[in-house]
Amino acid sequence: MINGGIIDNWACVSFSRIPPEEVHRFCCDLIQMCNMTGMSVNPRPLVDNRSANPNHIENALRDVYRRTTEMLGKQGHEKQLQLLIVILPEVSGSYGKIKKVCETDLGIVSQCCLPRHAARPNKQYLENVALKINVKVGGRNTVLERAFVRNGIPFVSEVPTIIFGADVTHPPPGEDSASSIAAVVASMDWPEITKYRGLVSAQPHRQEIIEDLFSVTKDPKRGNVNGGMIRELLIAFRRKTGRRPERILFYRDGVSEGQFSHVLLHEMDAIRKACASLEEGYMPPVTFVVVQKRDHTRLFPDVHGRRDMTDKSGNILPGSVFELMTCHPTDFGFYPCNNTNIQGTSCNYHVLYDENNFTADALQSLTKKLCNTYARCVPGLSTGEFFFLFSFCLNFT
């Protein structure tokens, strides 16, 4: 961990059939691991661990919140509960409800754990949960080694840079009345690029173009009011860093080749309007990259059996890149192998628009770096952290 979070008060509620003494032992092991990895966590819970009926999840969560709030009030603290550890029921399906009550209704940070892991936790599991908790309470797990060196990260370190990730998820076949959900995340720190903020928005059924990137609504008193997810995230970046973004890198997931031009035209226009609405003449250069995760291309070494060209699984080595359209001076795409592949295929990155004059090597290098800053696990990923974050946002809805 780079910066360990501080937790003075926490509690635990179990909706599983795990005996109370095992729940207590799990909490002790988890808190000990948090402290060992660099956090500062009070070893004692604010209130005693509680076992609750999985049929009364909302009532149990609200009761824990009430008890902890009363306890903090008696101690003269205005703070609320910093962390609630939740052991899920054996029957799946309650995660979304628990998160909605905790994060949306009560406004408390929660960490859910499966009962099979809580009953027999191993070191790796405890380490991974500790990483998740640290980020949730404001800590920082990873940062690129040269982030604070002048021009240490090409493109990013030179001037304030914001990195966006965006995607749309659609309802399954048969649900003709359900809305599609768009999610956009953006980096909120510079030059580290390790903290992100996400927004979600409902839009018409199975519409792939993100509708709420920029919007204008009419107010009877104020007239036209500018809004939208891009604008809100640009404002948040400026509040966090004290600087306005001078460059924008926009990664877009889930776009088929037949939709490239349509999505680019609409969403680039929305980005431009969002920037212009903040300040007259504000037009930072934008690079628009489409990422296709569901690609069937397999990469393999040209010499089969060469140990120096493959990992122990026989896949190509992490860091390898296969370039597309190498003869074109500006329009390019590539398949990077950013991580050790356990399952799946490489992603296809396709640059649709580039005002930042990236070379293929520069964009590939930056993308590789972004894949190694995911806060919730140690190994590198096939896509940047933002893709996992907006997928997480979409699963939250």
Image (cartoon, helix red, strand yellow):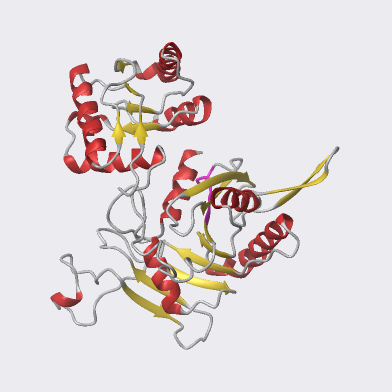
Q: Which of 286 and 255 is in front in this view?
A: 286
The residue stretch that appears in magenta: 165-174
Q: Please tell me whether residue 166 belongs to the stretch shown in magenta.
A: yes
Visible in this render: residue 2?
yes
Visible in this render: residue 347?
no
In this rendering, the answer to whether 206 lies above or below 139 is below
Q: Where is residue 42 in the image (x, y as percent from the top left)?
A: 29, 27
Outermost residue toward the bottom in this view: 327
From the viewer's perspective, is 312 left or right of 392? Answer: left
At x 41%, y 59%, the residue is 384
Q: Please tell me whether residue 312 belongs to the stretch shown in magenta.
A: no
From the viewer's perspective, is 52 left or right of 175? Answer: left
Examine the image and state in which quarter residue 177 appears.
top right
In this rendering, the answer to whether 16 lies above or below 151 is above
At x 63%, y 66%, the residue is 284
Q: Position of residue 336 (x, y in %)?
A: 36, 70
Q: Number of callouts in the render?
A: 0
Q: Nearer the viewer, residue 273 or 235?
A: 235
At x 64%, y 47%, the residue is 204
Q: Position of residue 292 (x, y in %)?
A: 45, 64
Q: Position of residue 171 (x, y in %)?
A: 53, 45
Q: Nearer the viewer, residue 175 or 227?
A: 227
At x 52%, y 67%, the residue is 289
In this rendering, the answer to whether 37 lies above or below 160 is above
From the viewer's perspective, is 25 left or right of 267? Answer: left
